[in-house]
Amino acid sequence: MEVPMLEGEESIIASKLYSEGFKTLEKDRQKRFKKLLDFYNDLTGFGETEPNAIIHHFADMYGPDCESCGKPYRTHKASFCAACGNKRK
């Protein structure tokens, strides 16, 4: 199953909600990051339960899609695809 990625304004909103979660004294992580989890799950329908994982689901953190297999390069500067080994042009 592919994890839904956030783009543009979605990433900005998620970042703000993630930051808000650190400003509360609530000990329960699910409650502390409820706004972030609800935002992501309502937007994607994915059902994520780990707030930290959402921060790694920002599309602009990764490079373009591989010309061979279609999976994203790990960074914008990556010279080869980690998934299939394709050499980037």
Image (cartoon, rainbow, N blue to C red):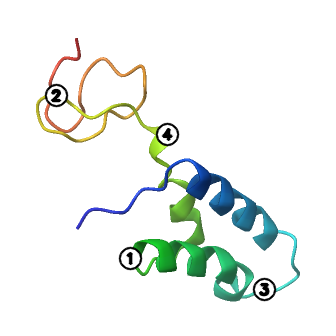
Q: Where is residue 77 in the image (x, y as percent from the top left)?
A: 42, 19
* Residue to which mark 1 is pinned: 46
| Residue type marked 3 | Lys
Find out whether the residues at labels 1 and 4 contact each other: C-beta distance under 8 Å: no
Q: Where is residue 64 in the image (x, y as percent from the top left)?
A: 33, 31
Give the mark nearer the N terminus: 1 vs 4.
1
The answer to whether residue 25 is left or right of residue 27 is right
Residue under the image location 42 percent in, 81 percent down: 47
Callout 3: helix, strand or loop? loop
Q: Position of residue 67 (x, y in %)?
A: 16, 28
Measured in 3D between alpha carbons, the distance from the residue under mark 2 to the one under mark 1, in whole angstroms, is 27 Å
| Residue type marked 2 | Glu
| Relative height, residue 26 to residue 76 (above, below) | below
Give the mark nearer the N terminus: 2 vs 1.
1
Residue under the image location 22 percent in, 11 percent down: 89
| Relative height, residue 79 to residue 84 (above, below) | above
| Residue type marked 1 | Phe
* Residue to which mark 2 is pinned: 67
Callout 4: helix, strand or loop? helix
